[in-house]
Structure formats: structure tokens, C-alpha cells
Amino acid sequence: MSEPEPRKARRAAIARRLVRGVAVVVAVFSVVVAALILLACFVNDQRIDQDMGSATATVTEVTDRRAAVEFDAGGGRHVRPVTGVFYPTGLIEGQRVQVEFRRANPDLVRVSGRSWTVAIVPALSVPAVVLPLAGIVLYLTSPGRGRTLPGRNPRAR
């Protein structure tokens, strides 16, 4: 016993709306996350700039996601920030680099001369992929797709 046509059409319309909704939510989420990442980088840079100290740090570990450093923050305070250094691109283990940190919180540390603008390309790379894919999904699931205009024969060219 086959399902009646109106029920199939209704289920297909619901599935199409669900897929479109998910595509929009994922697209918006990717843009919001990218904006929040850039905002966090900007705020951290502002905090460092307001109360800046500088030091020479040694890179102790480099992974895909972070670079760990250690440095003397003055007054005999030896610091190893838990989250590593901001903007670690191009660092290698054992390298000595100039860093800027917030004196009140030396865990906020960045490589000297780098700023939040370094994070623009990585932060926007996810939306740069997600938005076109969401656009394709929206196009392929649009309600009018596949219909022809009245008076047009889709096979005639």
C-alpha cells in the first residue's frame, strides 16, 4: 500500500523547510562565531595595550593549535601562560621571541608586533566555506526549483 501523493508532498515540503532552516542556522552561526573570535582578539589586544609589559620569551612547545612560551614578567615572576601565546604563526620550539603581555595578567601574552588583524583570515575562513555551501543548499531546496514558467516548454530550445 503506497502513501497518498498529498502526504508525500507534505512530508517533502517539511523536509525541505527543515534542511533550509538548518542551512540558515549553520550559516548565521559561522558568521557569529567568526565575529566573536575577532572581537575577543581585539579586546585582548586592548587589555594588553592598556597595561603593557614586554619580555623575551622562549617557545617551549608548538602544536597545531598553540605555541607555549615561558618568560620572566619582572619581579622574579616566571610565567608560562596556560593558553600559550596569541598569534603564534611561524614559531618553532626553542625560538626566542619578543612578547608583549598585560602586567596585571601575564597570561594575556602576544608575539610583539602582531595584533588582532592577524586573526582575520583564519576567523573568516569558516564562513567563507559555509556561506557558499549554505547558498547552494538553499538554492537546491528552494520551493520553486524544478518548476517551469507558464507557457514554457522545458524541452524546447
Image: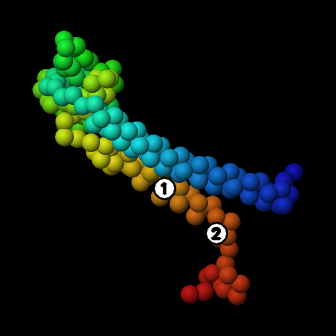
Residue 145 marker: 2
Report whether 121 appears left or right of 133.
left
Is label 1 in contact with label 2 (beta carbons under 8 Å)?
A: no
Q: To which quarter of the image does residue 85 belong?
A: top left
Report whether 33 appears left or right of 117.
right
> Residue visible at 64% across and 52% down?
21
Q: Residue furthest top?
A: 76
Residue receiving disc 1? 131
Residue 22 marker: none
x and y, in percent, of residue 108 in the image: 31, 28
Front-most of 88 and 13?
88
Q: Considering only vertical position in the picture, is 104 above or below 135?
A: above
Asked whether the viewer can see residue 109, the reply is no
Q: CA distance from mark 1 to mark 2?
A: 20 Å
Q: To which quarter of the image does residue 20 belong?
A: bottom right
x and y, in percent, of residue 140 in the image: 59, 62
Asked whether the viewer can see residue 6, the reply is yes
- Crowdedness near tag 1: few (<14), some (14–19) or many (≥20) residues, C-alpha within 10 Å: some
> Residue visible at 77% across and 54% down?
11
Q: To which quarter of the image does residue 148 belong?
A: bottom right
- Residue type for callout 2: Arg
Front-most of 98 and 135?
98
> Residue visible at 68% across and 65% down?
143
Query: Which corner quadrant holds the C terminus?
Result: bottom right
Front of the two marks 1 and 2: 1
Q: Considering only vertical position in the picture, is 128 above or below 93?
A: below
